[in-house]
Image (cartoon, rainbow, N blue to C red):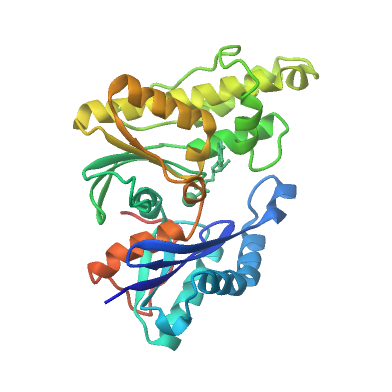
Amino acid sequence: MSITILAIESSCDETSASICIDGKIVSNFIANQTIHEQYGGVVPELASRAHMQNIVPVVDAALSSANCHLSTVDAIAFTQAPGLIGSLLVGTQFAKSLSLALNKPLIAVHHMQAHVLANLIDENNKPDFPFLCLTVSGGHTQIVLANSPLDLKVIGETIDDAAGEAFDKTAKLLGLPYPGGPLIDKYAQQGDAHKFKFAEPQIAELNFSFSGLKTSVLYFLQKQDSSFIKNNLNDLCASIQHTIISILFKKLQKAITQTGINNVCIAGGVSANSRLRKTFLEKANELGWKTFIPKFEYCTDNAAMIAITAYYKYLANDFVELDISPTARAEW
Ligand code: KG4
Ligand code: ZN
């Protein structure tokens, strides 16, 4: 019997829907919200309103491009946590209503677990278990040990800002619009990564810290003249990016040594960073890691990762009742 899942993602500022049939992603539609750019960050109220407007057309597009009708859907999945509560509420309520109307089971998905399992989407290039995953997004930075699709353990994480926040906040100091991560990536390609040196924090175990980097970039810029940023933008971007990537890979390398696991994945929005991807592959060559990176559209927020996670939950009969609520924060 075939299993068709409709999944909805609405945790932050992307409204997305995906259809997964028997573990294969058949469609994945994403509506990006550009309204936040002018405010220098995601405005929660505006995000919720945009989700309200986008959710019906996005779900319709996912269904029709998969040649699928609601009547053939076997389960409805949604992102239950973590995220912006108003954003999560829109997707949750929509999924609950569909589940009630269609009398089909409901599957609650943890957004961060889904980022990890995005690595299982490509059937021809997916890691064997156990594997390690460095998840780097706008809200989280984690090293996850995956023993099976539903047995995931966080073994290291940031104690303050996430890697994506480090990109976005330092970009803001450079006068770049939100989200600054992709722009730092772009300018860094023409820059010298060793031109400016920013201190790396010494944090215990497999944990990370990025708030000090933002402060040291701020203090450094305060000492320069008014045209400094304009004249050194590429080198500043390359040096900041180099520091973030160096912090990330030192801990990832430590995790690999500690666990002896060298099946290694990266996930989350920051894994779209071109230098990070390149460094990952260079390290793999140098140190014998077996590496996996999701396709670009499965790195940033998307419903396909929710759908693949829901597929494994469906196989495990892991359903939730209609009284479920979203939560902004969530333990694993
Ligand atoms: O996973 P994601 O789409 O959303 C969250 O769950 O947070 O990650 C968004 C983050 C933002 O901080 C954005 O600046 C960063 O990913 N990002 C990048 C790149 N593309 C997206 N950071 C650096 N380089 C990129 N190319
Ligand atoms: Zn995310």
Q: Nearer the viewer, residue 308 or 227?
A: 308
Q: Is residue 180 left or right of residue 152?
A: right
Q: Position of residue 167 (x, y in %)?
A: 57, 34
Q: Is residue 8 visible?
A: yes
Quarter of the view holding residue 223: top right
Residue sitting at x 40%, y 23%: 282
Q: Residue furthest top?
A: 195
Quadrant in the picture for residue 283? top left
Where residue 106 sits: x, y (%)?
36, 75
- Quarter of the rendered structure image containing ligand 1: top right
The number of discs equals 0
Quadrant for the C terminus, please.
Answer: bottom left
The vertical placement of 281 against 294, above or below, is above
Q: Quadrant of residue 248?
A: top left
**Placement of 122 over or under 202, stated as above or below:** below
Task: Give the quarter of the figure containing the N terminus.
Answer: bottom left
90 lies above or below 142: below
Percent across and percent down for residue 140 are 44, 44
Name the residue: 20% across, 32% down. 259
Q: Looking at the picture, how far across and down is residue 151, in whole percent?
A: 23, 53
Q: Is residue 170 visible?
A: no
**Residue at (41, 50) in percent of width and height:** 115
